[in-house]
């Protein structure tokens, strides 16, 4: 029987977008947590385009945008994502405002 430590192989993963695959723009993400996972729901929120839309939002200020993409992550993957995002945001912040760091 193979020990779990012996069976683990270190590898690097380089994802490739499938041919014809596309990217989806999102300016809003809703995060929902369950007992064993985190769900990310991505939407593209657009401003009202008519007086009727504006009046509707004033009377009932609840938007119900369509979810463009929904990703479910196990907790350990979500934690890794949070760490990577934090690092990337720190890098970007240093490039945008180098004197503040």
Image: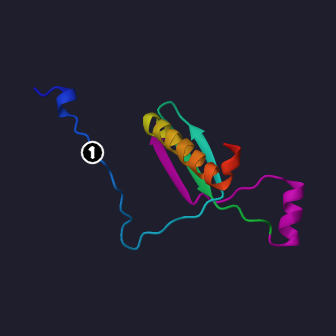
* Residue 50 vertical position relative to residue 67 in the rendered view, above or below: below
For image coordinates 34% across by 55% down, the residue present is 14
Q: Quadrant of residue 76?
A: top left
The residue that label 1 is drawn on is 11
For image coordinates 18% across by 33% down, the residue present is 7
- In this view, the residue farthest toward the left is 1
Q: Is residue 10 left or right of residue 51?
A: left
Residue 67 lies in the magenta stretch: yes
* Residue 66 vertical position relative to residue 30 in the rendered view, above or below: below
Mark 1 residue crowding within 10 angstroms, few (<14) / some (14–19) / many (20+): few
Of residues 16 and 39, which is closer to you in this image?
16
Residue 2: image location, x then y, percent = 13, 28
Image quarter hosting the N terminus: top left
Residue 58: image location, x then y, percent = 89, 57
* Residue 98 vertical position relative to residue 51 in the rendered view, above or below: above
Element under disc 1: loop
Report the magenta residues as a range: 49-74
Residue 94 lies in the magenta stretch: no
Of residues 48 and 20, which is closer to you in this image?
20
Q: Is residue 93 left or right of residue 1?
A: right
């Amino acid at each position: 029987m193979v020990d779990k430590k012996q069976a683990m192989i270190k590898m690097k993963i380089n994802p490739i977008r499938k041919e014809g695959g596309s990217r989806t723009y999102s300016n809003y993400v809703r995060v929902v947590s369950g007992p064993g996972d985190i769900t990310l729901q991505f939407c593209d929120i657009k401003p009202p385009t008519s007086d009727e839309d504006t009046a509707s939002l004033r009377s009932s200020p609840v938007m119900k945008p369509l979810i463009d993409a929904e990703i479910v992550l196990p907790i350990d993957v979500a934690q890794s994502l949070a760490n990577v995002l934090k690092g990337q945001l720190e890098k970007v912040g240093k490039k945008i405002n180098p004197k503040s760091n």
